[in-house]
Image (tube, rainbow, N blue to C red):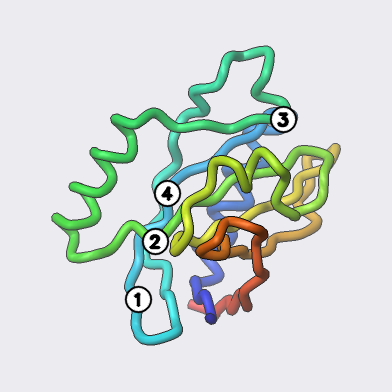
Amino acid sequence: MNVTLSHSLQEEIVSQMQDCFPNEGGGFLLGEIDDDNITIREIVQIENSFEAEEQYHRYAMTPQNWVKMEDTAEEKGLTLVGYYHSHPSSPAIPSKYDRDHALPNFIYIITAVYTGPKCLEQRVWRLREDRSQFDEEELIVEHD
């Protein structure tokens, strides 16, 4: 599966994640699904709801965030296709915690942010139906 987003949306994700450093940040991905392609049309940053002392290595949203975002996506004629989050001072590879809390059929854009803060890597993943592991998908960045 290919995941496409504009250069400006990619830059917005990077900027948000750098602003959250040294903690994890994240948000929702709204887009369109066409055959084996997902096109990200909008991103919506959501405040990290994890306890403050755990935010350096954990990111969470509330169930209310999910419900509201599904309604928002529908109102815009888009689909909630996944979410994005950062890994401060860690590679853009899903953790065991990510796998335990992920949903199959969603995509997950992970941005590695290091001291600076500086983004060094951004990758996209999808959890297998049997929840055994993530598979990396191709991230295509289109120039606006």
Verify CB contact (< 8 Å) between mark 2 and mark 1.
yes
Q: Are marks 3 and 2 in contact (CB under 8 Å)?
A: no
Q: Earlier in the sequence, mark 3 or mark 1?
A: 1
Looking at the image, which residue is at 40% across and 46% down? 44
Q: Which mark is residue 138?
A: none
Q: Amino acid at mark 4?
A: Phe
Helix, strand or loop under label 4: strand
Where residue 48 appears, as percent x and y from the top left, is 52, 28
Task: Return the residue at label 1.
Answer: 33
3D distance between C-alphas at marks 3 and 1: 31 Å
Amino acid at pointer 1: Ile
Q: Spot the residue most to the bottom.
A: 35
Q: Earlier in the sequence, mark 3 or mark 4?
A: 4
Residue farthest along the left direction in this orientation:
75
Residue pushed farthest front?
Answer: 130
**Residue pointed to by mark 2:** 81
On residue 28, which mark appears? 4
